[in-house]
Amino acid sequence: MKKFLALALALCMIFALCACGQQATTTATEAAPAAAEAATEAAPAAEEAAPAAAGEGITIGVVYKQSGNAYFQAGVSGFQQAADELGFTFMHDGPDDSSNDGQERIIRNYIDQGVDALCISANDAAGLVDVCKEAKDAGIVVLSWDAKVDPDGRDLDIEPASAKVIGLTQLEFIVGEMGGEGQLAIVSAGATAPNQNLWISFIEEALETDEAYKNIEYVGTVYGDDDYTKSYDVTKALIDQYPDLKGIIVPTTNGAPAVAKCIIDEGKDDQIKMTGLTLAHDMAEYIHGGVAPATFLWNPIELGYVSSYVAVAAVNGEFDFAEGATIEVPGFEGLTVEVSDDGGLILYLNKLNKFDDSTVDAWIDAL
Ligand code: RAM
């Protein structure tokens, strides 16, 4: 009876095939929800949620780029909210040094422990393919979330929004702040980071081809490796090398506060403005202060939450890894699998929020 109930409940998770693959389009929303809403947006009350037993007996191994990164701690709370609703168990870990080797060791350990699914935010899209293939051969569902594993190593990649939208939202904003002209630099995370590199590729393409940016002199990208001190130091070196620098894009949460602090310490906050992908709590003072007039981010809690629902459905054999497949997740609509530019499968949440002087405080408790 118990078994039957569990099966019946599991079947309540509805996954359908839909022929219409839609292009991802996202625009940053001006309005941030109240903090309480932000925190609960991804986690509807348990009684409204899909079947509590769907995840019973399932173990998920969550792997992220680095330990101690508040962005991934938020992501983990999304996995926890889904675990509370669906009943699966999960482990989570990331290397201290943001290395590919460290992630490989964690994944191997999870394979040895017999996990049913892996959810990985990769430091190197190609570097994890072999170990992920081993996992797939062992019957493990392999999802990447936040930062992709290359198609051969994954079943599906789950991303907050299209890479082009994420990249160009930051570019348009900073160029507006720069009055359409002057020197622009990027301070990124690690040099192999799949998500940052993709966003930057769209930024660089637009800088080369779009007339709107013809008066922008792009001086290049430097890497702070998602380390506060290194991000600060590379920013200082940039400012020394380019005394006329007017804008910096920082597409990484760990680097952003270090860059803002450095601009201010160098006494350049009247001249240099920055934007990027940031959390709210560690950037609010810089957003209010004006050195970062606005920044952007999706809700990483939601990314963990949706990844959990996909993982559980896939382990239960109820999610088809195919273009057009859809999944129902409480609080989300229209989640549809598409074919990504890299030829693999991708699912977008399509949510990007803008943190500015009037919205950032509402997000501080959540992010
Ligand atoms: C950092 C990580 C993560 C990225 C965010 C924006 O925390 O690099 O992968 O999505 O920034």
Image (cartoon, helix red, strand yellow):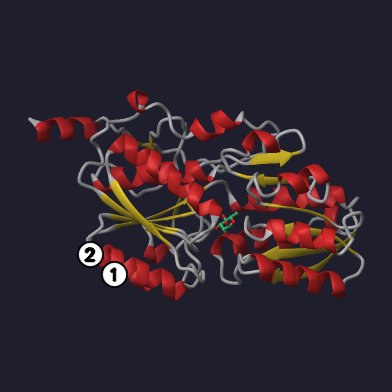
The reply, left or right, for residue 52 in relation to residue 174 is left
The correct choice, above or below, for 4 with respect to 144 in the image is above
Q: Are marks 2 and 1 in contact (CB under 8 Å)?
A: yes
Q: Is residue 101 above or below residue 283?
A: below
Relative to residue 295, is residue 261 depicted above or below? below
Count of picture labels? 2
**Callout 2 amino acid:** Ala
Residue drawn at (82%, 45%), measured in percent from left and top? 289
Q: Is residue 258 visible?
A: yes
Quarter assignment of residue 181: bottom right
Quarter where residue 360 is shown? top right
Q: Of the residues shown, which amino acid type is indicated by label 1?
A: Glu
Q: State the image coordinates of residue 141 (x, y, percent, origin top left).
A: 30, 55
Relative side of 139 to 232, left or right: left
In this rendering, position of residue 113 left or right of residue 214: left
Looking at the image, which is closer to me, 114 or 77? 77
Q: Quadrant of the C terminus?
A: top right
Question: Going 26% across and 30% down the picture, which residue do you hit?
Answer: 12
Q: Residue furthest left?
A: 1
**What is the C-alpha distance between the residues marked 2 and 1?**
6 Å
Q: CB at mark 2 closer than 8 A to ligand 1?
A: no
Residue carrying label 1:
134
User: Could you say whether the residue bearing mark 1 is in a helix, strand or loop?
Assistant: helix
Q: Residue 292, image x and y in percent?
A: 78, 49
- The quarter of the rendering in which ligand 1 is drawn is bottom right
Q: Position of residue 120 (x, y in %)?
A: 42, 59
Q: Nearer the viewer, residue 27 or 206?
A: 27
Residue assigned mark 2: 138
Instruction: Check the picture and name the quadrant holding the N terminus.
Output: top left
